[in-house]
Image (tube, rainbow, N blue to C red):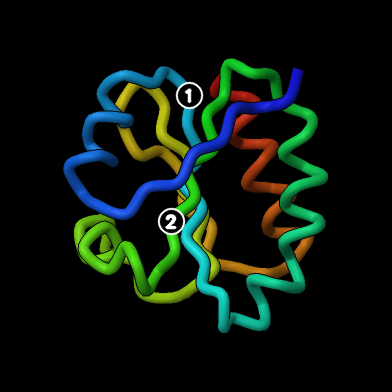
């Protein structure tokens, strides 16, 4: 089974998800972001290797600007894994190699 997915636009909702989900990846991107579009197919391919124990939370950087300030996001794409409510690893790259390393770190923590 593939991971579950949801979208989030406000900080309170994100905090609630962080408190209730054991394994989560927050994906912050923007519709206008070229690197986000280029890495998206590879990101989704990597994501499919995870079970439904993982929740993917997608945040549009423009619509979720208060989430970006809360998480101190400086660039897109940004990927953050959250394990037991704590942010563990952050990837701010659109490189396949870096995204693959991020997923490997996430897998080891699960």
Q: Where does residue 88 sit, x and y in percent of width and height?
A: 41, 38
Q: Say if 70 sits above or below 23 in the image.
A: below
Viewer-closest of 88 and 46: 46
Q: Secondary structure at mark 2?
A: strand
81 to the left or right of 108: left
Q: Residue at x 37, y 48 (%)?
A: 8
Q: Which residue is mark 2?
A: 59
Q: Where does residue 37 sit, x and y in percent of width and height?
A: 70, 72
Q: CA distance from mark 2 to mark 1?
A: 17 Å
Q: Name the front one of labels 2 and 1.
A: 2
Q: Residue at x 72, y 38 (%)?
A: 47
Give me the disc on residue 88.
none
Q: Where does residue 36 sit, x and y in percent of width and height?
A: 64, 71
Q: Which residue is mark 1?
A: 23
Within-10-Å neighbours for mark 1: few <14, some 14–19, many 20+: many
Q: Where does residue 35 sit, x and y in percent of width and height?
A: 67, 78
Image quarter of the C terminus: top right
Instruction: Identify the mark nearer the N-term, 2 or 1.
Output: 1
Quarter of the rendering containing residue 73? bottom left
Q: Say if 27 sits above or below 108 in the image.
A: below
């Amino acid at each position: 089974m593939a991971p579950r997915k949801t979208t989030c636009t406000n900080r309170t909702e994100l905090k609630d998800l962080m408190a209730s989900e054991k394994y989560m990846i927050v994906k912050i991107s923007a519709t206008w972001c070229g690197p986000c579009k280029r890495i998206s197919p590879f990101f989704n391919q990597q994501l499919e290797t995870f079970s439904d124990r993982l929740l993917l939370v997608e945040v549009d950087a423009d619509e979720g600007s208060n989430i970006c300030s809360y998480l101190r996001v400086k660039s897109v794409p940004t990927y953050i894994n959250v394990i037991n409510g704590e942010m563990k690893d952050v990837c701010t790259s659109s490189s396949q190699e870096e995204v693959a390393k991020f997923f490997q770190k996430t897998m080891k923590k699960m």
